[in-house]
Image (cartoon, rainbow, N blue to C red):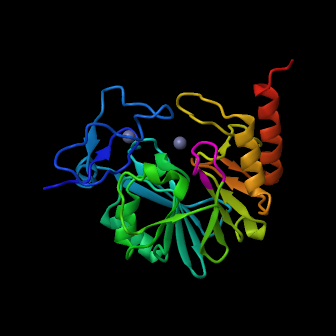
Amino acid sequence: MPENYICLTCGVQHAASNGPPDRCKICDDERQYIGWAGQQWTTVEGMKAAGHSNRIQEVRNEPGLWSIDTRPRFGIGQRALLVQTPAGNVLWDCITHIDDATIERVRELGGIAGISVSHPHFYGTMIEWSHAFGGAPVYIPRADAEWVVRPDPVVQYYEGAQEPLPGVTVVQVGGHFEGSAVLHWEQGAQGRGALLTGDSIAVAADREWVTFMRSYPNYIPLPRSALDGIVRALEPYDFDRIHGGWWELTVDRDAKEAVRRSAERYVRWIRDPD
Ligand SMILES: [Zn+2]
Ligand SMILES: [Zn+2]
């Protein structure tokens, strides 16, 4: 029986094949790496058998935003975020583990009307998640189509920006990937606007600044043109807060200015002083 294999290092599920694929396209790229024990694979059932489960918690001081991550930690270790709106919920970023308890809890929270992901490292099992919630559309920038390693009719490609539900817009900012995106949530931060950024904009440890990288694990920086592109793509949007890809990595206030001044600082350091 063909099986949808999942790469153990990045957690991304691939198109069905008889036997595990030779390579993971996503890990076999200079932005990622092959696991130190060599390329290994699992499946959705294999993850359940390994004793994984998901933790679903409302984000502190942000009513309507729920964080979903997997214990024990799996793959890259990111979280997904569920944004609740009066018109339905959007799942932003994805994880690999999905089970009945997760589906039941997310249904109690209002289900999923649309899915969008910041970039290929966080695709996880996005097609499984869509199928579990009535084939909810999965919005991916067309620029990253080549990275969708499990193609499916639920995937809808967009260019520039897309509004899955009123008040929720996904915006392609580029940088980390050509199709790297962020989610703008108008009602976030008590109505001041919030941005969910994954790896497209990374919240720094001091939580006052952010950074931008072509590769985080391999420390590859971005050129000035990419930073300018990110700042420019966000100009039309008001936001006061940024929720990054990991727990507690939040720029709590004045986040739009934090993006601008962080890009400026970055350019100062990559520019040859002479
Ligand atoms: Zn991989
Ligand atoms: Zn990444």
Q: Say which residue appears at 28% left-offset and 50% top-offset.
A: 47
In the image, the segment drawn in magenta is 173-181
**Going by the picture, which residue comes out furthest to the left?**
1
Name the side, left or right, on which 121 lies relative to 221: left
- Residue 176 falls inside the magenta stretch: yes
**Going by the picture, which residue comes out furthest to the right?**
274
Q: Nearer the viewer, residue 61 or 197?
A: 197
In the rendered image, residue 124, in percent from the top left (x then y), is placed at 41, 52
Q: Say which residue appears at 51% left-offset and 52% top-offset.
A: 144
In the rendered image, residue 189, in percent from the top left (x then y), is placed at 73, 64
In the rendered image, residue 249, in percent from the top left (x then y), is placed at 64, 46
Name above or below for residue 104 compared with residue 249. Answer: below
Q: Say which residue appears at 23% left-offset and 49% top-offset.
A: 46
Name above or below for residue 62 compared with residue 273. Answer: below
In the rendered image, residue 134, in percent from the top left (x then y), is placed at 37, 76
Q: How many labels does the image show?
A: 0
- Residue 26 falls inside the magenta stretch: no
Quadrant for residue 128, please give it. Answer: bottom left
Q: Say which residue appears at 31% left-offset and 26% top-offset.
A: 37
Residue 102 appears in view:
yes
Q: Quadrant of the N terminus?
A: bottom left
Q: Is the magenta stretch mostly helix, strand or loop?
A: loop
Residue 210 appears in view:
no
Q: Which of 97 and 56 is in front in this view?
A: 97
Name the side, left or right, on which 88 lies relative to 52: right
Name above or below for residue 15 compared with residue 185. Answer: above
